[in-house]
Image (spheres, rainbow, N blue to C red):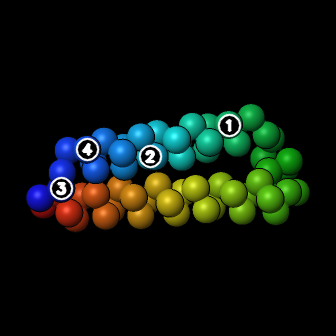
Amino acid sequence: MIRPEVLRKRLMKLDEYVAILHQIRRYSYQEFLDSPERYGSAERFLQLAYLLRHRSLLKAC
């Protein structure tokens, strides 16, 4: 069973990653594609969010 404080920390990190992804939405599709830094960041934060959520759910079961 996952401890409540650990789950709270993970949820806070998930909120942080989602906020960063929302900031990236301000760029047009073409601006996004033209910048490896932007799409690389988006890819990484999506990966981190997925892993964090996936690991949290596995440990919670």
Residue type of the residue flagged with mark 1: Gln
Q: Which residue is mark 1?
A: 23
Residue highlighted by disc 2: 14
Q: CA distance from mark 2 to mark 1?
A: 14 Å
Q: Residue at x 45, y 46 (%)?
A: 13
- Residue type, numbered disc 2: Leu
**At 80% from the left edge and 59% from the top edge, which residue is drawn?**
37
Q: Counting residues from the N terminus, which is met first, the one under dot 2 or under dot 1?
A: 2
Secondary structure category for the residue under label 4 = helix
Residue at horizontal 20%, vertical 63%?
A: 59
Q: CA distance from mark 4 to mark 1?
A: 27 Å
Which label is found at residue 5? 4
Q: Quadrant of the C terminus?
A: bottom left
Q: Nearer the viewer, mark 4 or mark 1?
A: 4
Residue 50 numbered mark, or none: none
Q: CA distance from mark 3 to mark 1?
A: 31 Å
Q: Which mark is residue 2?
A: 3
Cα–Cα span, label 3 and label 4? 9 Å
